[in-house]
Each structure stands twice: as C-alpha cells, then as structure tokens.
Image (cartoon, rainbow, N blue to C red):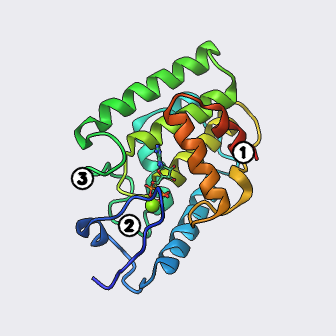
C-alpha cells in the first residue's frame, strides 16, 4: 500500500478500499496528503468567494455532497460520495441520507422561523452533520466550512476563526476543539460556539 499513516485522536482511519481511491500516486506521507488536501480545499474556498448562495440552495443534499467534492475531488476518487462503510464515529451507513435530510429540513426551519441565534444555527448544523459523518474522510473540515457558509451567506456575518490554530494536526487548538465537540455531544453547544469564534 505504501501508506502507513498515524492517526491522531478524533480522526477517522481509512480502510483499504478508501486508500485505493487516492488519485495522486506520488503521495507517500501523511504530511504530503494533508498538503494536497489543503490546496484542494483552498480551491473550494476560492469558488465560494463572492458567490451568492441562499439557505434553500445550501441546505440540500446536492450542495452538501458537491461541496465535499470541491474540497477533496482532486485527491480522493470517493470525494462527494456518501461513505460505504461503517466507522467508529457516525451513524449506520444506510441511515446517512435520511439523517441528513432531517438535519437539512430542521436547519431550514430554524432559519426561516428564527428559532435560534445565527451562531447556534450554524454551529448546531456543524455538529450534527459531523456526527452523521456522511463521508469516508474530511468530515471535520467539511462541517466547519459548511458552518462558515451558513454564517456568511445566510446571515451576512464574518466566517469563524476556529481557534486560529491548525485543527488537522495534534495541537492545543485541536484538543480544545475536541473538548468542545464532546460537550456538544452531551447537548451543550456553547463551548463549540465560543471555540469557533476564538
Ligand atoms: N465525539 C465526537 N462527536 C462528534 N464529532 C466528532 C467527535 N470526535 C471527532 N469528531 C469530528 O470528526 C472529525 C474527524 O473526522 P474526519 O472525517 O477525519 O474529518 P477530517 O479529515 O476533516 O479531520 C473531527 O474533526 C471532529 O469534527
Ligand atoms: Mg480525517
């Protein structure tokens, strides 16, 4: 396989089938992989700049999948496709479409009825979508970009800073981030909102 990657806490291991979807055969290390993914994500961010997107457009299965494809499509063959295997994190693979549909409908309802503050809506969406874990990998970064899109395009506010550190590698920021994620698992969304704005 050639790829012997170490996984840090809170990251999803890839299985053999998914490693086979690597589109750039010269990638040999975890660091190189991260770099290629980061470049691809920057293309997705470029695509978003100045683009007018409504809540009705963003909160669709089609948008959620196509954003993942834009973020990782140059690196992974399975980018933009729902995962075909069960993970230690996330729900049963067969339940992904229905769980996502319920989340998209709920979020559109929260927005239209101003059920919560914009931050609560964006961050609750982020936490629920990463908990579903639609994709084989890249869910954390995808969920954070989705929250940025909601807060910026729907509510006209500034995107989040997400602790201003690197969340992909083991770091103080990541430890704090995962602490906030686990608080959200227990129903307390405030630490994740505070973290996103820090
Ligand atoms: N206990 C948890 N509950 C919900 N989400 C979690 C939990 N632990 C980790 N996560 C999320 O899963 C992400 C890791 O999934 P992964 O698909 O590997 O994303 P990425 O490759 O972008 O880091 C973390 O960044 C975090 O957002
Ligand atoms: Mg990962």
Question: Residue at the location (47% across, 55% down)?
Answer: 10
Compute the Cα span from label 1 to label 2. Answer: 26 Å
Q: Earlier in the sequence, mark 1 or mark 2?
A: 2
Q: Position of residue 177 (x, y in %)?
A: 61, 50
Q: Position of residue 195 (x, y in %)?
A: 69, 44
Tag 1 residue: 159
* Image quadrant in which you'd find residue 193: top right
Q: Residues within 10 Å of mark 2 (few under 14, many from 20)?
A: some
Question: Residue at the location (39% across, 45% down)?
Answer: 133
Q: Say if 167 sits above or below 64 in the image.
A: below
Compute the Cα span from label 1 to label 3. Answer: 32 Å
Which labelled disc corresponds to residue 78?
Answer: none
Question: Residue at the location (55% across, 35% down)?
Answer: 184
Of circles 2 and 3, the one toward us is: 3
Of circles 1 and 3, the one toward us is: 3
Tag 3 residue: 85
**Residue 122 seen in render:** yes
Q: Say if 175 sits above or below 133 in the image.
A: below
Observer-nearest of 27 and 23: 27
Compute the Cα span from label 2 to label 3. Answer: 16 Å
Q: Position of residue 88 (x, y in %)?
A: 32, 51
**Mark 1 residue CB less than 8 A from any atom of ligand 1:** no
Which labelled disc corresponds to residue 76?
Answer: 2
Query: What is the tally of numbered marks visible in this picture?
Result: 3
**Residue 63 seen in render:** no
Q: Earlier in the sequence, mark 1 or mark 3?
A: 3
* Image quadrant in which you'd find residue 103: top left
**Mark 3 residue CB less than 8 A from any atom of ligand 1:** no
Label 3 residue SS:
loop
Label 2 residue SS:
loop
Residue 145 is left or right of residue 138, and the answer is right
Label 1 residue SS:
loop
């Amino acid at each position: 396989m050639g790829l012997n990657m170490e996984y840090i806490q809170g990251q999803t291991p890839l299985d053999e089938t998914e490693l086979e979807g690597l589109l750039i055969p010269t990638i040999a290390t975890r660091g190189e992989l991260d770099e290629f993914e980061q470049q691809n994500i920057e293309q997705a961010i470029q695509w978003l700049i100045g683009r007018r997107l409504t809540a009705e457009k963003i909160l669709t299965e089609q948008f959620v999948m196509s954003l993942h494809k834009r973020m990782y499509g140059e690196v992974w063959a399975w980018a933009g496709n729902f995962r075909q295997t069960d993970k230690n994190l996330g729900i049963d693979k067969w339940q992904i479409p229905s769980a996502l549909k319920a989340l998209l409908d709920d979020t559109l309802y929260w927005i239209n009825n101003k059920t919560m503050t914009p931050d609560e809506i964006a961050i609750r969406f982020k936490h629920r979508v990463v908990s579903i874990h639609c994709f084989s990998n890249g869910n954390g970064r995808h969920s954070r970009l989705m929250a940025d899109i909601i807060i910026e395009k729907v509510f006209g506010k500034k995107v989040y800073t997400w602790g201003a550190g690197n969340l992909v590698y083991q770091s103080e920021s990541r430890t704090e981030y995962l602490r906030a994620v686990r608080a959200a698992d227990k129903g307390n969304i405030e630490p994740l909102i505070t973290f996103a704005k820090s």
